[in-house]
Amino acid sequence: DAEITQSPRHKITETGRQVTLACHQTWNHNNMFWYRQDLGHGLRLIHYSYGVQDTNKGEVSDGYSVSRSNTEDLPLTLESAASSQTSVYFCASSVEGSGTEAFFGQGTRLTVV
Amino acid sequence: GENVEQHPSTLSVQEGDSAVIKCTYSDSASNYFPWYKQELGKRPQLIIDIRSNVGEKKDQRIAVTLNKTAKHFSLHITETQPEDSAVYFCAASPRGGGYNKLIFGAGTRLAVHP
């Protein structure tokens, strides 16, 4: 079955290290998104992409970057991890078109110590 | 950019009662308003959505209403059951970005007590 998967599910890293979270979908969706979830803030958009070689900044993009070299993957990189980036990260994807359902991955719990 | 506010942050009801969650949005051009349910430790999943050309939509015990003039929309759950206990998120799809990205509210934690 087609799906969207994130890896790793859990990660602990040290302040200042570079970290990459993987997101892979097999639906051939053009749209892919990264959100972070923190208590009291809901889901905040970090970066998003509408197709290969397209990337855009979201609401809370500082300290994060993404690249889209193929349709299936949108890795999220924390360039220099900070304690404020401790969070649960969700990747999502949706079909091209106005107002379409976003399907979420299982989430990655990242702890920066 | 789009801003979505959601109230209340927590809601506690008795089984069988109704629950209402309200959201307001800032971008008058937003045209798609989904609601997601997230159970503890799980991923958010779509439960119902509404588009700007519709005022109300119903699916069994859940319904969503949209008031474009006032820029607010609401989720109504009737005959609540313990399995309705979860965090609910509203979202809006703003014009900026081609109506594809979703901006979420902060969430409402609903507890249904037997």
Image (spheres, coloured by chain):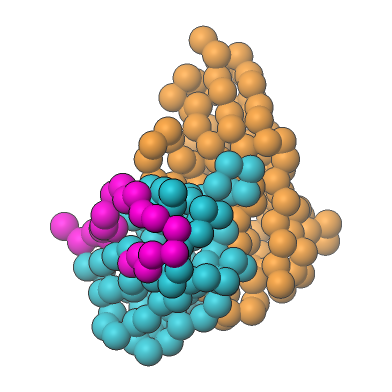
Chain colours: A cyan, B orange
Let me know if residue A50 appears in the view: yes
Residue A5 is covered by the magenta coloring? yes
Taking B67 as reference, is B7 above or below it? above
Quadrant in which the N terminus of chain A appears: bottom left
Q: Residue A25 appears at what percent x and percent y?
A: 26, 66
Identify the residue shown where x is 48% and y is 71%: A64
Identify the image quadrant of residue A52: bottom left
- Please say if A83 is above or below A59: above
Q: Which residue is found at the position 59% from the left and 66% from the top?
A: A60
Q: Is residue A99 left or right of residue B19?
A: left
User: Horizontal and vertical percent for residue A36?
Assistant: 50, 56
Per the image, is A112 magenta? no
| Residue A33 occupies quadrant | bottom left
In front of the other: B30 or B68: B30
In the picture as drawn, the residue positioned furthest to the right comes out as B70
Q: Could you tell whether B76 is left or right of A20 in the image?
A: right
Q: Give the range drawn in magenta.
A: A1-20
Viewer-nearest residue: A60 or A26? A60
> Which residue in the rendered view is the most extreme toward the left?
A1
Seen at 83% across and 57% down, the residue is: B70
